[in-house]
Image (cartoon, rainbow, N blue to C red):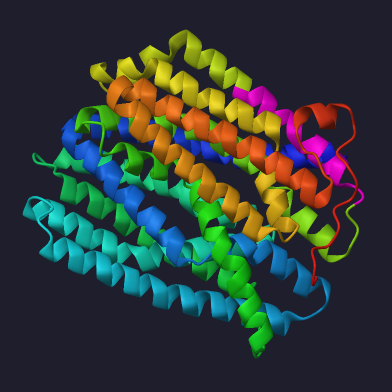
Amino acid sequence: MSLGSLLFSKTATLLGMRLGGAGAGFLTQLLLARMLAPEDLGLFFAATSLAIVLATVTSLGYPEIAPRFMSRYQERGKPEVVAGFLRQANRETLIFSLLVGLLVGLTSAIWPVGSVDVVALFVLVAVMIPVLALFSINGGVALAQRRFLVAYGFETFLRPILFLAALVTLYLSASVVDLWIVASLFFGLTAGLALAQYLTLRGSLPQGRPKADGRLARRWRLEGAPQIAVAIYTLLFADLAIILASIPLGATQLAAFGIALKLAMLVGFGLQVAHQVIIPDLADAHASRSLGRTGEVMRAAAVFPIVFSLLALAVILAVGDHVLALFHPDFAQAKWALAILVACQFLRAVAGPSGQLLTVAGAQAANAAICIASTVVLTVAKVALTPSFGLTGAAVAVFIAWVFWLVVAALCLRHITGIRCDLPALLARRPGPAMQPAAGE
């Protein structure tokens, strides 16, 4: 099987799984829009986004650097160092996430955030932060092992399907459904699936006595910490954007923006899958100092994102208002916001996986600085545009931040590694020289 066919097969399998989950998610959003008031739906989005973002922070970047370091130590025949890396990642993540969860719980208990149900909701968020953080760690480990179904299946396929089934059962059997019950179902299912993922993965983890000296431990911390900003910006952009939009937008508009952004990020997940299936191959090549085929790998992975994002944009321009109206008639007003957000995904497809390649090259500090600067741009643009232009302004702010991020990341990648992964360079078959090992490799 050719490289292109292999990558397409992996991407198609994962995307098919994601689309199944997305279909369940679509029906779930429809059902939630009928079960909850728009204000409660906005609160549900805000609470789940807060839990996911804080869990990403408390995972300390370990899920993102797992493919890089696990590939290196496996290439060198050092399973005991892999075990040491995993022990440190899990231990430090658990401690930090428990501390942050405790802070969130205490804050929600003493701060006048609203009704008793709202306070209980954010206490639940606090409890879930360690669970979600460890869920993220195990997903990164599964990705490093190329166990893509384990990395994505529990979260992106099983969770939306099981959550939909639970909501349908609740809807048919209960006369009163409130925000607390829905959030408890969501987080409870997530906890169960996190445990199932760990049990599935446990048998493939390195056995024996973990080994890590102080130098390695410090290096993992130093390289992992910058990845917090990268992960929040790249993997959890929708949650970040919802949190930033929650202040200038009213609850109903926030719900409409949340629906539009989540639909756009479904397109983004297709791009993410196409990019991430090549990361273990690039990490292995980097560990073995044989990155001469990076151009071939990136060209093979570029076709699907371009075609998929263009088709999605065409559909949204044609019937986007009708799609949004399925959730709630008032949400049709977000059509142009949705179109702008999907256009961001097309730009991402054209730009290629610059951020992932910076991580593989060991340029974590530069990658983090770019994502932090992009977050600042997003925040400033949200503050400047959303109060005056509402939903469209919030979407334009996202567009501005993404253009900034993609352009600066591409320039930084070219400066550090000599590589270009954007569509014009790949079409010209000149992605640049093989990526050189970072200093200290």
Instruction: Looking at the picture, tell me which residue is in the foreground, 116 or 6.
Output: 116
Mark count? 0
Rendered position, 363 above or below 399: below
| Rendered-image quadrant of the C terminus | bottom right
Instruction: Looking at the picture, tell me which residue is in the foreground, 98 or 394.
Output: 394
User: In the rendering, at what x and y percent does residue 140 appear?
Assistant: 59, 61
Q: Is residue 26 left or right of residue 105?
A: right
Q: Is residue 150 left or right of residue 324?
A: right
- Principal secondary structure, stretch drawn in magenta: helix
- One can see residue 353 in this view: no
Q: Is residue 64 left or right of residue 261?
A: right
- What's the residue at 87%, 65% (across, down)? 288
Q: Which residue lies furthest to the top in this view?
A: 318
Magenta segment includes 154: no
Stretch in magenta: 292-309
The image quarter containing residue 61 is: bottom right
Magenta segment includes 300: yes
- What's the residue at 25%, 21% (across, down)? 328
- What's the residue at 72%, 61% (across, down)? 362
User: In the rendering, at what x and y percent does residue 349 appear?
Assistant: 66, 31
The image quarter containing residue 160 is: top left
- One can see residue 309 in this view: yes
- What's the residue at 15%, 33% (across, down)? 37
| Rendered-image quadrant of the N terminus | top right
User: In the rendering, at what x and y percent does residue 367 appear?
Assistant: 63, 53
User: In the rendering, at what x and y percent does residue 187 appear?
Assistant: 31, 56
Instruction: Looking at the picture, tell me which residue is in the foreground, 313 or 159.
Output: 313
